[in-house]
Image: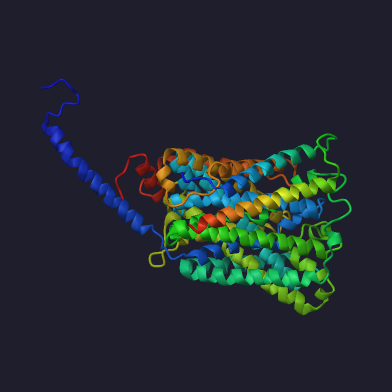
Amino acid sequence: MSNNPNSATPTPDSHRDAAALPLEAARRDEADRKYLAEHSLKRPLRVLDIWALGVGVVITGEYFGWNLALKNNGPIAVLIASLIVCVLYLTWVLGLSELSVGMPFAGGPLAYGRRAVDSSLGFVMGWSMFLECQFATIATALATGGYIAFLLNPAEPSSTVQVWTALGTVLIFFVLQVWGVKEQSLAMVIMTYGAILGLLIFWCLAATNFSWDRIWTTALLPENKGWQAVLDAVPYCLWWLVIIETVALAAEEAHEPHRTIPRGLVWAQLTLIILVVLTWLFACGAMDDAQQIAVDEQGQDISYPLAKVIGSLAVGKNSLAVYGFGIIAIFGMIASYHGMIYGTSRQLFGLGRAGYLPAFLGEVHATRRTPVVSLLVSSLITAGFVVANLWFKDAVAVAVLVSTLTALIWYILAMGCLYVLRLREPQLFKDYSAPLYHMLPIAVVLLSAFAVYVYAGIDVKVIPLTALLYGLGLCYYWFWAHRRIRSAAPEELAARQAAGGGPLS
Amino acid sequence: MRPITLLEQIATAALALVILSLGWIMLMAAQPTWLRLKSVQMEVLLVLGLLIAALLLVSTVALRQTRR
């Protein structure tokens, strides 16, 4: 017998092993295919659907949240901060398009981190996006309730009405999302048109009291703060455009993602930038004091700023104007809520399907192929926070800031993944590569780092809460989930195949 | 990797200037007496012009890319 350990001389045992290995691999492939088939989503989304999802999910940012940036900062500081945010998001969607076309999975950031580095980074990125979407969903549900409460009693909106209508929104959109992805996509397109119509009405009404002098004020920046006002405005201005990355999660449900995702995302982003500038312009130009859009007479944050502007105009004394706008404005809120619950549920679904969170979150409805369990869980979390708003009055501001902070964290990590994967697997991006090849990820990282830096200067202390949420997630991952990751999940299979560890195709 | 067009080079330069301007804004937030322009109005106009130019250039490059 040869002493060479690599000898080709067959032994009875090696014959048996050689025969067993392909059988074992085939069995594993068959099991993987079955798991994928049971956990797969439909692919009906086209460019218009992607555009509508992108605009619709973000358009709530035009209706509330950004107005808090006006507190002690003035209109010009808010404009500069808004344009910085627009540059950040324009570059971000281009980088994101490249990643999502290369890895069109519902897990999105989970897939990017897993493939570029390892499952720990995948979890951190996926968890970040889940927190981003979940807190955005909470803020939007509350603001929807706030708008409806304002409509019912403009003089003194009731917090009880706000909570009940927010809970109604949660229930209605849970049912719609479970119904089916194509049906909810059609609803999204209709609601997005409604939301844009609401903004058009707002601009027309606000134009009746518009004055340039209210925008280009004598002291362009507040004299006591100077350029610090721009920094203070940035965290709230992020809310104009945050959550557009939900579209990346739709890549697994998109027809020809290499065409539909970049086109839909870029057009959505450009539409939103126009909406941002015009909404800022007319809101600030129509009010004698822009501060009145941020806080009410009692010093409470306002979650219905556009309705507040209309209510204070001469044309707003006509109840038809106030109620007409208010009803259409609700389209904007629910369009975004609809898109956000889509993002939250898909992220939970992706994390559950891959084993990073409990496996039941990765289940889909037997016939409709919608992630029913993750939809239920994210809706229940939203409902819990909505009820908590009765006792915690800063809920909207905190939810807005946690959502934007967690978003920035994964933008930076995602651009790191893009760099690593471009170097290691250039063929991954053969179907679509973003313009400004080297500068683009650098710009996203530096702009995001700038935005994270300015969080240190804001009043609402969200950093400890955010750190706690990351701590909880990481504890679950390290002590439980990392030994139970599903090898058959698409994100995991793709990463293993890239590393040469799995034959499934 | 495909060749970089002149428009992309200009857009890259505009983005680099935007990033430099953010560093400048962070310095200005401390309200120093140095590194200031003639007036706040001029500073604001310069920063706004830079941001708008970067947005227009990057948008144009992005739209051209999606047509391929």
Q: Quadrant of residue A344?
A: bottom right
Q: Tell me if I can see residue B68 in this picture.
A: yes
Q: Nearer the viewer, residue A370 or A440?
A: A440
Q: Which quadrant holds the N terminus of chain A?
A: top left
Residue A360 in the image: x percent, y percent?
43, 54
Q: How many marks?
A: 0
- Residue most toward the front? B6
Residue A375 in the image: x percent, y percent?
51, 60
- Residue most toward the right? A218
Q: Determine the residue positioned at 86% across, 42% down.
A: B38
Q: Determine the residue positioned at 75% across, 63% down.
A: A305
Q: Tell me if I can see residue A133 in this picture.
A: no
Q: Quadrant of residue A228?
A: top right
Q: Nearer the viewer, residue A503 or B3?
A: B3
> Colour scheme of this structure image?
rainbow
Is residue A465 depicted above or below A363 in this figure? above
Residue B55 in the image: x percent, y percent?
65, 53
Q: Determine the residue positioned at 68% across, 74% down.
A: A327
| Left or right: A201, with A18 as reference point | right
Residue A378 in the image: x percent, y percent?
54, 57
Is residue A1 depicted above or below A179 in this figure? above
